[in-house]
Amino acid sequence: MAIDINWIRDDASLAQHCATWQKLPFVVLDTEFVRVDTFYPLAGLVQVGDGSAAWLIDPLLIGDWAPFAALLENPAVVKVLHACSEDLEVFERLVGALPTPLFDTQLAAAYLNLGFSMGYSRLVQEVLGVELPKGETRSDWLQRPLSPTQLSYAAEDVLHLAELYEALLPRLSAEKNAWLLEDGEELLANQRRVTPPEEAYKDAKLAWKLAPQQLAVLRALCIWREREARARNQPRNRVLRENSLWPLARFQPDNLVSLARIDDMHPRTVRQDGEFILALIKEAAALPPQEWPEPLPEPLPPEASGVLKKLRAVGQREAERLDMAPELMLRKKTLEALLKSGFPAGPYQLPESLRGWRRELMGQALLDTLAGQTPGVQA
């Protein structure tokens, strides 16, 4: 079918449309971007739908995003997206605002037990019986003019997203809809939560295996890598590969030949930043013991896996009772944090990451399971 393409290519037109959208109960949003060798996504297109039409905003021509930011932050207009974590990054970078309240149709599918982490095409097929054309997701969205195929793909995306929302919303109970919007707030909080460069070493692979003096080196390397990636607008792995961090901290090379032999070390990194990395390692390795980081906690031992299984069963029981996708209930990281708070003998503490309805419905049952009791069925 032929789709009307409505372009927004200047600030006045964007402001005018935003004023209209501010009066709607919901808008659907999507973005197309390129992120091949940059740290930040480069926006190529922003799509908006209202349930009857699709608009394509050309971000290469817009200078004033304030009216759009006001729309994104208007609590009276629900923002509908699908699997939106990357879109959130685009909006934050491009507009300086995030869409709230946020209704993610991928989450809605999990709440209705249609499937977990469902791709957009599959969900459209499942709910609307429409087969979407493939093949444009990875095309160059910064080129101008965009091809007719790209344009129809981008417009069709938001037209179907509005239909999806209107089909899924009535199937959600008021309770589930409230939980879904709560999860949307959590997604926004995660996007706003930036790990300080000084803390990045704690997430590095196998960091727990390093002694405090080696951790001092790892911390210095991670701080530099994080800051450089942002400053150069390059992916972290382009600055220094993830798999090189641990051996660098462990073996602490002191010359370019040894540096080049480090696992997964890219020759370009040795050429471009080798001398600086060696100086950084030397300086961090020479720090006095009182400036070394604390040792990092070890992963849970193998014998914890049986307990983890029992904890997961708490979530599975609730998922069955509520007819929701079991993967939606309790995240592995949350259960591991709970176990680490007191394994093997307790006492255990519910982690901060177990929040909202999940804490309310399952918190006590998890603690009861750890205490060896049979969790009571919660109403």
Image: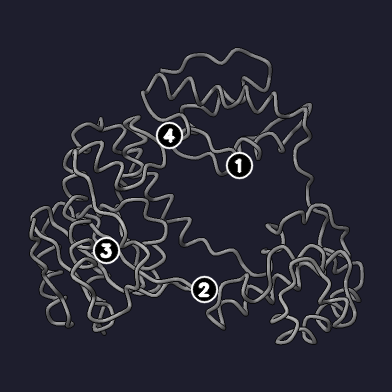
Q: Amino acid at mark 4?
A: Trp
Asked if the residue under mark 4 is in contact with the one under mark 1, i.e. CB atoms within 8 Å, the reply is no
Q: Earlier in the sequence, mark 2 or mark 4?
A: 2
The residue at which mark 2 appears reads as 39
Q: Which mark is residue 357?
A: 4
Q: Earlier in the sequence, mark 3 or mark 1?
A: 3
Q: Which mark is residue 49?
A: none
Q: Earlier in the sequence, mark 2 or mark 3?
A: 2
| CA distance separating discs 1 and 2 | 26 Å
Callout 1 secondary element: helix
| CA distance separating discs 2 and 4 | 35 Å
Residue at 22% from the left image edge and 61% from the top image edge:
153
Q: Earlier in the sequence, mark 4 or mark 3?
A: 3
Q: Earlier in the sequence, mark 1 or mark 2?
A: 2
Callout 4 secondary element: helix
Q: Amino acid at mark 3?
A: Leu
Q: Which quadrant is home to the N terminus? A: bottom left
Residue at 55% from the left image edge and 24% from the top image edge:
364
Q: Quadrant of residue 166?
A: top left
Q: Which mark is residue 72?
A: 3
